[in-house]
């Protein structure tokens, strides 16, 4: 289909005649890029058409565009992060941090490396981020697509139903096994005894001991794919132990990750308990981060099918914000809405020129300062503005302060005021605001 589209464009170019004196354009094949990558989640892609009727889509995630970029630029080795908007034709749930337009933060490692080293680093980064955010206890579920495929094979699932059954298994974190089984049998035509055999496996979870147990499983250990996946997971747990995060990881056979492009290790971080006070409503935001290995995706965009092994993770920015905001509300804490360090204020009228001089001095010194856009604002209004927006300091200019060569520096939180010599003001503001801010 791509070749057909390219041929059409070449034909149009030929009809336009010679290139002399005409602006050059780049041949592009935007349609096809997203299709066949997301399995049953493809129904959530926003489809569009441009003025010429060409089929386009808003990006569903940052992974497929990253793989296309690698293929187009013939890159075989890169480590990168990316924060940008993605779009899902989903049912929004504001309290759960689920939107149709939202930000994701991705981190990926592309290249041919020894097994499980990049994968372990991605999990270390995920745990480091979630720990730093202090949003509550969390657990990272880990599985491997090869183990899932091997499990489906020995249980008797037809090859053609692997991905659709995988999508059903992925719902086990939301609904009961009985509901998942009914979907497999009633909607997807799977034999009940096959579904029961799947149920015996997917309801198991644990640590490296479960990996070792399954390596001895008389049926699963005979499947080549599953054996490779279990071997890699055993190695992964060794590295995670060295990284000091093995206690945050659970080998969970119900984790499926419905996206079609995953080929190996997959993982998903979920909160273990709400970060609110006892008795408060739980914060149901689902998973807050996920990812996995996708070794075949780049090859789907390369004309010669050259593969670039990749592994990465994605953090749900809005979901994190939902948790933090609800936690602050539960604790009756205000959310700081500005990075401003100090407000330049005046205690009397007709001091606009002095305020402008001082705020300019602070800007030139790298201080994040601002002032109210009024000639003669009331001091009380200026102080209230700081309290509402979370500005921690107020530099107050008055007639007496001008005579004495000082600035009155006020702490908004404690309401304590001290006179600071004008030449020392910048250093004093830097000293007081040098502590890193925490969103929680």
Image (cartoon, grey):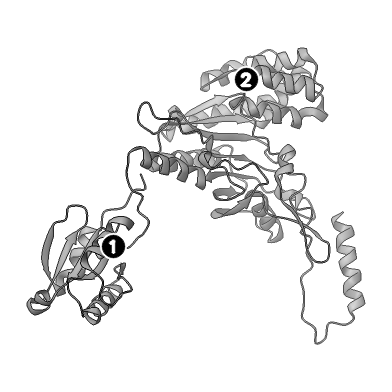
Question: Which corner quadrant of the image does residue 260 belong to?
Answer: top right
Screen quadrant of the N terminus: bottom right
Left or right of residue 77, residue 194 in this image? right
**Is 30 in front, or is 186?**
186
**Residue 37 seen in the current view:** yes
The residue under label 1 is: 341
Name above or below for residue 5 compared with residue 155.
below
Which residue corresponds to the image point at 53% horizontal and 54% vertical from the top-left?
83
Question: Cα distance, mark 2 to mark 1?
Answer: 51 Å
Q: Is residue 127 above or below residue 71?
A: above
Which residue bears the numbered disc 2?
176
Q: Which is nearer the N-term, disc 2 or disc 1?
A: 2
Residue 47: image x %, image y %?
75, 52
| Circle 1 SS class | loop
Q: Write the residue at 65% across / 45% down.
A: 309
Where in the figure is residue 24, as x and y percent of width and height? 77, 78
């Amino acid at each position: 289909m791509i070749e057909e589209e390219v041929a059409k464009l070449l034909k149009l170019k030929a009809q336009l005649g010679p290139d002399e004196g005409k602006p050059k354009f780049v041949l592009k094949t935007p349609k096809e890029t997203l299709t066949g990558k997301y399995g049953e989640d493809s129904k959530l892609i926003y489809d569009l058409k441009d003025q010429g009727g060409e089929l386009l889509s808003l990006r569903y995630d940052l992974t497929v565009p990253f793989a296309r970029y690698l293929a187009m630029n013939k890159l075989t080795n890169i480590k990168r992060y990316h924060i940008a908007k993605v779009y899902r034709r989903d049912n929004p749930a504001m309290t759960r941090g689920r939107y149709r337009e939202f930000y994701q933060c991705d981190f990926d490692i592309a290249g041919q490396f020894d097994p499980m080293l990049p994968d372990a680093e991605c999990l270390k980064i995920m745990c480091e981020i979630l720990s730093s955010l202090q949003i509550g206890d969390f657990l990272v579920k880990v599985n491997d697509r090869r183990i899932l495929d091997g499990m489906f094979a020995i249980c008797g699932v037809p090859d053609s139903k692997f991905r659709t059954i995988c999508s059903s298994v992925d719902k086990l974190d939301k609904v009961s096994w009985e509901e998942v089984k009914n979907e497999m049998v009633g909607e997807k035509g799977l034999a009940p005894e096959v579904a029961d055999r799947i149920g015996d496996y997917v309801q198991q979870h644990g640590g490296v001991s479960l990996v070792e147990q399954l390596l001895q499983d008389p049926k699963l250990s005979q499947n080549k794919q599953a054996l490779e996946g279990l071997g890699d997971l055993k190695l992964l747990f060794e590295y995670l132990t060295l990284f000091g995060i093995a206690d945050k990881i659970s080998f969970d056979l119900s984790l499926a990750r419905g996206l079609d492009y995953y080929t190996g290790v997959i993982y998903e971080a979920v909160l273990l308990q709400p970060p609110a006070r006892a008795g408060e409503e739980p914060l149901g935001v689902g998973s807050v981060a996920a990812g996995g290995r996708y070794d075949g995706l780049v090859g789907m965009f390369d004309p010669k099918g050259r593969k670039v092994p990749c592994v990465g993770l994605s953090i749900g920015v809005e979901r994190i914000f939902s948790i933090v905001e609800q936690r602050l509300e539960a604790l009756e804490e205000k959310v700081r809405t500005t990075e401003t360090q100090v407000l330049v204020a005046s205690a009397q009228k007709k001091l606009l020129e002095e305020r402008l001089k001082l705020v300019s001095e602070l800007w030139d010194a790298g201080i994040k300062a601002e002032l109210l856009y009024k000639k003669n604002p009331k001091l009380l209004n200026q102080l209230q503005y700081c309290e509402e927006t979370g500005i921690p300091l107020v530099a107050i200019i008055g007639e007496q302060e001008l005579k004495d060569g000082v600035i009155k520096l006020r702490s908004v939180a404690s309401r304590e005021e001290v006179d600071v010599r004008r030449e020392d003001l910048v250093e004093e503001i830097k000293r007081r605001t040098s502590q890193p801010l925490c969103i929680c």
